[in-house]
Amino acid sequence: MLANAALLTATLMVPNPLDAPPWPVAMKLRPPRFTFFLMLVAWSAFTLSPRLVLGSGLTVILSWSVGVGVVALRSETVLGFGLPDARSEALARYLDPRLVDVAAWASTVFTACPVTAIFATVVVPTRRLEHRGQGFKKGACNRESTLLGGGSRSEQ
């Protein structure tokens, strides 16, 4: 899971060498890319392990935060918090391609926490249901064996 999250972070953060204009690295944070990380959390739910789902949520949050932190700590990066007010200089600062919006990072982390909790909560009853289904299948096979004349040794 850590390798997947790290590879996804690197893929989304490293500039594309085929892009003609050299965009600032902070522009990589502008489109909503964090939804790809939530797919990793969703895929971990198929394991039916609440611990793995919680671990993948934590891994995704840490990986994205490290990626945003690396971009935010660059010398050319301008940090901002939230949408600008009505002043023209605030709007110009917000539209600066070197801006990293800390509020946008915080909202992605805040979104990942309840999504991870929901997946982990849904996995628990699904896992119980799956285990009951396996027990039902074993019981059904035993009943079929008895009905077909293959009963137990004590009956023969």
Image (cartoon, rainbow, N blue to C red):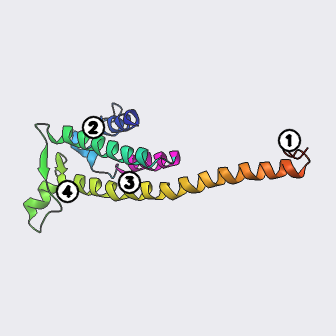
Report which quarter residue 28 is drawn in.
top left
Dot 2 and dot 4 residues touching (CB under 8 Å): no
Q: Distance of mark 2 from mark 4, alpha carbons?
A: 27 Å
Q: Distance of mark 1 from mark 3, alpha carbons?
A: 51 Å
Residue at left offset 13%, top offset 42%: 77
* Image spot of residue 124 (x, y percent): 48, 55
Question: Which of the two residues, 130 or 148, is positioned nearer the viewer here?
Answer: 148
Q: Distance of mark 2 from mark 3, alpha carbons?
A: 37 Å
Closer mark to the observer between disc 2 and disc 1: 1
Q: In which quarter of the image is the C terminus?
A: top right
State the extent of the magenta-drawn residues as a range. 34-47
* Residue named by callout 4: 103
Q: Distance of mark 1 from mark 4, alpha carbons?
A: 71 Å
Question: Is residue 112 inside the magenta stretch?
Answer: no
* Residue named by callout 1: 153
Task: Decide if residue 102 is on the left or right side of residue 7.
Answer: left
Along the polypeptide, which appears first: circle 2 or circle 1? 2
* Residue named by callout 2: 21
Along the polypeptide, which appears first: circle 2 or circle 4? 2
Q: Is mark 3 on a helix, strand or loop?
A: helix
Residue type (three-letter) at the residue carrying disc 2: Pro
